[in-house]
Image (spheres, rainbow, N blue to C red):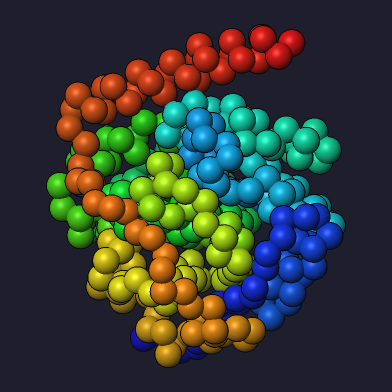
Amino acid sequence: MQTYKSSVSLIRATSYESAALRESLITLLEPLGGIAAFVKPGQKVLLKPNLLTGARPTKECTTRAELVSEVAKMVIEAGGKPFLGDSPAFGSAKGVAIANGYLPLIQELNLPIVEFHGQRYQTVSENFNHLLLCKEAMEADVIINLPKVKSHLQLTLTMGVKNLFGCVPGKMKAWWHMEAGKDANRFGEMLVETAKTINPDLTILDGIIGHEGNGPSGGEPRNLGILAAASNVFALDRAILEILNVSPQQVPTVAASQRLGICPELDEIEFPLLHPDLLQISDWRLPDKLMPIDFAMPRVIKSTFKHLYIRFIKEPMNTYSRG
């Protein structure tokens, strides 16, 4: 039973232009205490964007570099030491970031990009008594989760909780699809346990332009015009469903967090700025048809080889050709 209301900050935001975006972020975070409520001087701060793929850089499949840049600057001003990390489905974090326009940000702020490496961490769940998670996230002083709101062929929607699956290193994600994906409830619970174990300090959701339809990469951009922030990632995801008019039972991560008693009901969430009712849209496009969550062994093998090819052959060749 919660003894206090989780707070989700919601605002309208329509621009990725630096000055406008910075002003939006200051407004967004002010009810939560500002960035200084989360970052203290000298702390190592992991920025965890959605770096899904470098294959469709104009289709809003990843968290915008502009948003990551402004958050990184705010962290630096608070005295923190930001670094960027993710474990993309295909390729390296740095390769996918550069393909999606992150290079100016990396160079301007001298922002390190780390490749995640796995280590087993105990959880309190009986069903998932160990998870292979990246030590770079688990050992960071602060984690700022920076998801993109997208429709998802297997999970209906991907938001804050699903973005933390990127803290499962390398191709372990495909193995989890194979191991737990035969049961959508179990897979949703695995994602929730992952998010609970990682326990991000702050989640800022990029919903200025989302990705609807056959996501997470095969859909199309959609102007949504929102930014959301919360320290409780489960409350944030629940609020976004209200904006998009999607039932929690349609989204395995949200349904699982409700079953496990860690997702507050809507009336248990405080909205200090805008209420989801004021931001609702009725025509957000979900996938045309949901795909099975589980991966068969041939798909895991094929996926693994594709990942290795992109990371160790294609990306180095692209770097060489640019030189």
Residue 122 vs residue 210, the one in the foreground = 210
Q: Position of residue 316 (x, y in %)?
A: 59, 13
Question: Residue 212, relative to residue 9: is it above or below?
Answer: above
Quarter of the rendering containing residue 247: bottom left
Quarter of the rendering containing residue 245: bottom left
What residue is rendered at 31% in x and 72% in y?
248
Q: Position of residue 110 (x, y in %)?
A: 80, 36
Task: Count the labels in the image.
Answer: 0
Left or right placement of residue 107 versus residue 151 in this view: right
Q: Position of residue 35 (x, y in %)?
A: 73, 66
What residue is rendered at 48% in x and 78% in y?
280
Question: Residue 230, relative to residue 203: is it above or below?
Answer: below
The quadrant of the picture occupied by the N terminus is bottom left
Q: Residue furthest left?
A: 182
Quarter of the rendering containing residue 115: top right
The quadrant of the picture occupied by the C terminus is top right
Q: Position of residue 252 (x, y in %)?
A: 28, 61
